[in-house]
Image: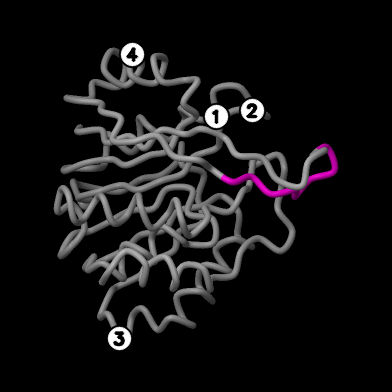
Amino acid sequence: MKLKQLEGLLGGLQQFSNPKVELEQYPTGPHIASRLIYTAENTFGDLNGKVVADFGCGCGTLGIASALLGAEHVIGVDVDPQSLDIASINAAELEVSFFFHVELDLIWCNIKNLELRGQLVDTVVMNPPFGTRRKGSDMDFLPMALKVASHAVYSLHKTTTREHVKKIALRDFHATSADVLCELRFDVPQLYKFHKKKEVDIAVDLWRFVP
């Protein structure tokens, strides 16, 4: 599947109808999501035929994109059951299981309490909170991702936190490598009352961590 085709399919997915500010729920737009997933597969071969987990999956964008590029089994994890309902609808509308023969599981769970027995997951893809509402929430996902993934972890983090993310990943979470693949622009729409502008672009890094 070509990049533009993938972006087009992701553009038709439903997003949060009533986003929760305490969870920093912002939709992962089709532009940035397609590039993350396309890079993971076409540069590194980390998706096709693999078990992929989407941590903080929200409406399922990254997990569904992984399925479209050949993942064998996708596990979406989120603390918000309403988001998982939307993710299920999105997967059904694209007929992910039928046309792409992908096993899809959605798990309602706080990522800190996740228990996946054994090395079940090959690759983790995620767009965690940026940590602007609750300091440190951006790094809550990374240790669990590095714990369960056998191949790689792909994650988005604000560019302003680059040095901090790298230091913590290598020193505290024992990643073998932590590399910024590219810098992208994350479009944050006017979703909450405290937003003064119609939309804001935030510089984010696309990371690839090796556990």
User: Along the polypeptide, which appears first: circle 2 or circle 3?
Assistant: 3
| Alpha-carbon span between mark 1 and mark 2 | 8 Å
Is there a contact, CB below 8 Å, between mark 3 and mark 4? no
Judging from the image, what secondary structure is the residue with disc 1 in?
Answer: helix
Badge 1 is on which residue?
137
Residue 175 placed where, x, y %? 23, 25
Other residues around mark 1 within 10 Å, as few (<14) / some (14–19) / many (≥20)? some
User: Along the polypeptide, which appears first: circle 4 or circle 1?
Assistant: 1
Badge 4 is on which residue?
167
| Alpha-carbon span between mark 2 and mark 4 | 19 Å
Name which residue lies at 72% across and 42% down: 21
Judging from the image, what secondary structure is the residue with disc 3 in?
Answer: helix
Looking at numbered disc 4 in the image, what kind of residue is underneath it? Lys
User: Along the polypeptide, which appears first: circle 1 or circle 2?
Assistant: 2
Side (left or right) of 193 relative to 206: right
Is there a contact, CB below 8 Å, between mark 1 and mark 3? no
Q: Nearer the viewer, mark 4 or mark 1?
A: 4
Task: Identify the magenta region.
Answer: 187-194
Residue 31 placed where, x, y %? 46, 56
Other residues around mark 4 within 10 Å, as few (<14) / some (14–19) / many (≥20)? some
Q: Nearer the viewer, mark 1 or mark 2?
A: 2
Question: Residue 66, relative to residue 202: is it above or below?
Answer: below
Looking at numbered disc 3 in the image, what kind of residue is underneath it? Phe
Q: Nearer the viewer, residue 105 or 161?
A: 161
Q: Nearer the viewer, mark 1 or mark 3?
A: 3
Judging from the image, what secondary structure is the residue with disc 2 in?
Answer: loop
Q: Is residue 44 magenta?
A: no
